[in-house]
Amino acid sequence: MRANKNKLSTGALACMTRMEAAALPQAVIENFLRLYALVEEGRTGIISEAEISPVASLDRYEDIIKDPELRRLGQAVLPELVVCKLNGGLGTGMGLERAKSLLEVRRGLTFNHVVAEQLMQWREKTGIEIPLLHMTSFNTEHDIAAFMEGYPALRISGLPSYFNQHKHPKIYSDTLMPAEEAEEALNWNPPGHGDLYAALVSTGTLSRLIAAGKKYIFVSNSDNLGATPDLAILGYLAAKRLPFLLEVAERTPADRKGGHLALRKADNRLVLREAAQAPQDTEGSPCAEFQDIERYRYFNSNSEWGELEAWQRVAEANGGVIPLALIRNEKTVNPRDARSRRVYQIETAMGAAIEVFPGAGALVIPRSRFSPVKATNDLLGVRSDAYTLGADQRLALAGARETVGPPVINLDQRYYRLIDDFDARFRVIPSLACAREFSVCGDFVFNSALTICGRVVISDERSLPEKTVFDPAISELVDEKFALTDQGALRTKFGS
């Protein structure tokens, strides 16, 4: 339904005009105006503690994997599955200027190479062709299209290997008018992964998938190499006839600021609360309750499964979109200039659809299915021996690390945030298999093999004659759990 221009505010009308000039689909414009109206009302998208309660328990992967019937059902419906990777990001936070998924992650392999090889191995193992789709952006579509030319076996005949997400106008926070910067690219922001549903519909991809005989979809981030198809989960989805299934994992200290699952008190539905939707503390971080991993035990892995016809029905009932909760992100209009004008970015989260679909569910997965890379901290972890790349090309925590979780890594952002700086300094990746926490404060070059155990802080603020690595007493692996020590016991001179 086209918006009545006579009833729109000046700001809403200006946004609508801007989006129409950019040839955005009408359904996307209408949905943006719905969210914009909430911002005009002063809504922030914040989900308060009073609105939600913790989730007591959920079905777990280790239980469903024991049911051979679920695996048999998953095998039976495998020909109806399509895999979709979220591939719209440039990785600008790490200084990249092309698709982040083309970043080398292990032994000369990029994220996309590993993802493609995962599905090729599924094809060899099962004899079933599982197609691969990418949701791209105007920044990454050419990179991804060129990459997929090397994997024609992963395409559906007559269907492109990618579809583009949309874009939203940035809104000046003081006037609520659309941004008008001289550099046009600064006036737009990605709409968040929640745009998946509208993009599937507006590009015709959803209807074409259904026409091609596809019934189920598995969606995950391109940088999460632990997220692969799974017969037990697919069988679970089909057996329970779930329209939507979110993969969640047990939170560890490394996940304190990641989006978590909760119950909305008003209707007892599962709801996702992202960091941008949590009340903030005095330092601008999510509130203590949000970061309480004992209270909110499950975090969103941003991997989900769905039944395509159910998605189509809900989208058709809502004008071509899935109506998701508002995320109002406040940033600077130029992300490279902290002094530039403040703006609101209107976004939505893909996992927020869990409260839209009646009967939607969540499944607790092992950490082996979650190994994302959002920053160079994460990249150091997955390039190290804390992770392994198995014969099935799935990246997973190594050995007993799956029990204790990944090491907590904090690199000095002055010297390690950008990928070129990171690569120049980490000439040799240290061993992190027994690391609990690893922090680097200062400018160091790692050019020799080091073993980091327990909790290690390397700092140039210590009163030392030379840059020095402090390596705690060697940890012992006892009953597949780490017994960690924190006392410095070994000094190793460190070359420049």
Image (tube, grey):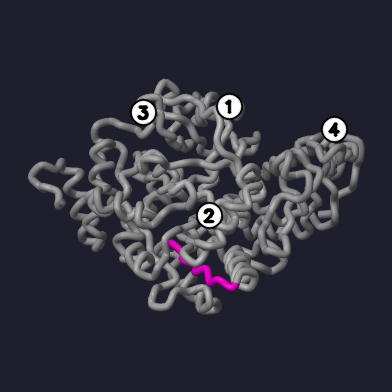
The span shown in magenta is 127-135
Q: Tell me how far mark 2 sits from mark 3, CA to CA.
A: 28 Å
SS under mark 1: loop
Q: Give, as a three-letter code, the residue at label 1.
A: Asp
Residue at the disc numbered 2: 234
Q: Give, as a three-letter code, the residue at label 3.
A: Asp
Q: Tell me how far mark 1 sits from mark 3, CA to CA.
A: 23 Å
> Residue shown at 32%/52% (left/top)?
168
User: Which of disc 1 and disc 2 is earlier in sequence?
Assistant: 2
Q: Position of residue 80 (x, y in %)?
A: 46, 64
Q: Give, as a three-letter code, the residue at label 4.
A: Thr
Residue 417 seen in render: no
Residue at the disc numbered 4: 485
> Residue shown at 80%/35% (left/top)?
462
SS under mark 3: loop
Dividing the picture into quarters, in which one does residue 409 lie? top right
Q: Mark 2 or mark 4, which is nearer to you?
A: 2
User: Which of disc 4 and disc 3 is earlier in sequence?
Assistant: 3
Q: Tell me how far mark 2 sits from mark 4, CA to CA.
A: 42 Å
Q: Are marks 3 and 4 in contact (CB under 8 Å)?
A: no
Q: Are marks 2 and 4 in contact (CB under 8 Å)?
A: no
User: Which of disc 3 and disc 2 is earlier in sequence?
Assistant: 2
Q: Position of residue 332 (x, y in %)?
A: 40, 44
In the depicted structure, whether residue 12 falls above or below residue 203: above
Q: Are marks 2 and 1 in contact (CB under 8 Å)?
A: no
Q: Tell me how far mark 1 sits from mark 4, CA to CA.
A: 24 Å
Residue at the disc numbered 1: 292
> Residue shown at 25%/53% (left/top)?
316
- Tell me, for residue 267, which label it has, or none: 3
User: Which of disc 4 and disc 1 is earlier in sequence?
Assistant: 1
